[in-house]
Amino acid sequence: MKFSTAALVVAASAVVSGAAIQKRSVVYQVSDFSAACIPHSTQCLYEFGVFQPGTMQTDPIPCQAMVSANIDGTLPDVMYGACEQSSRTFNVVRDAEGLGFLVQAPVSPRSNTTGVYHIPNSDLVMSDRPNAVVQSYAGPKAFDLDFLV
Ligand SMILES: *[C@@H]1O[C@H](CO)[C@@H](O)[C@H](O)[C@H]1NC(C)=O
């Protein structure tokens, strides 16, 4: 049997896209995400709900951290922010492209189920009000965290 080149290309790309779909797996779903430094304050508040699909969980669990602002008013890093009624915690770590965001929960004494998401700088805005230069998040309220392998 002889296959046309076009048919082979279609078959090959189907295999490639199938692999790509399998690779991306959602571990946590975040909703109502907000992050903002409070004008005329030295504090910034991160707040969101986190839901783990495919578990007994029925409602998002609220997570929150109040942290000291960076001197320049930008959103600061968070280490082990707390989530209610669970052992989940979250971290925020700034990099050149924006903020790395991670949610983790222990599955055994030595390992965590960790989900990651990257907030681009384009989703962060600086207020230009006089004497209140503070940063806040202006991106989508809900997004998915990919399983960190
Ligand atoms: C798992 O997460 C906890 C915080 O929830 C942290 O203290 C611990 O170091 C993490 N463990 C691993 C193996 O990443």
Image: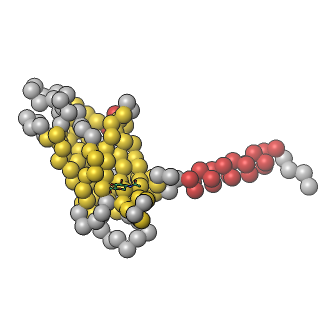
Q: Nearer the viewer, residue 10 or 60?
A: 60
Q: Is residue 96 left or right of residue 48?
A: right
| Res. 22 visible in picture | yes
Q: Residue furthest bottom?
A: 56
Give me the residue at 46% from left, 54% from top: 147
**Residue 37 shown left or right of residue 148 in the figure:** left
Q: Position of residue 20 (x, y in %)?
A: 59, 50
Q: Which image quarter: residue 99?
A: top left
x, y percent for residue 21: 57, 54
Image-based side of 103 in relation to 40, left or right: right
Q: Position of residue 36 (x, y in %)?
A: 20, 42
Residue 55 position within the rendered picture, expressed as x and y whole percent measured from the top left: 40, 70
- Note whether 116 is above or below 70 in the view shown: below
Label total for image: 0
Work out whether 63 lies above or below 95.
below
Q: Quadrant of ligand 1?
A: bottom left
Residue depicted at 26% across the width and 45% down the height: 78
Left or right: 55 in relation to 71: right
* Picture quarter with the N terminus: bottom right
Q: Residue furthest top?
A: 130
Residue at 69% x, 47% y: name it.
13
Can residue 140 be seen here? The reply is no
Image point (75%, 45%), residue name? 9
Relative depth, front residue between 109 and 43: 109
Q: Does residue 119 lie above or below 71 as drawn?
A: below
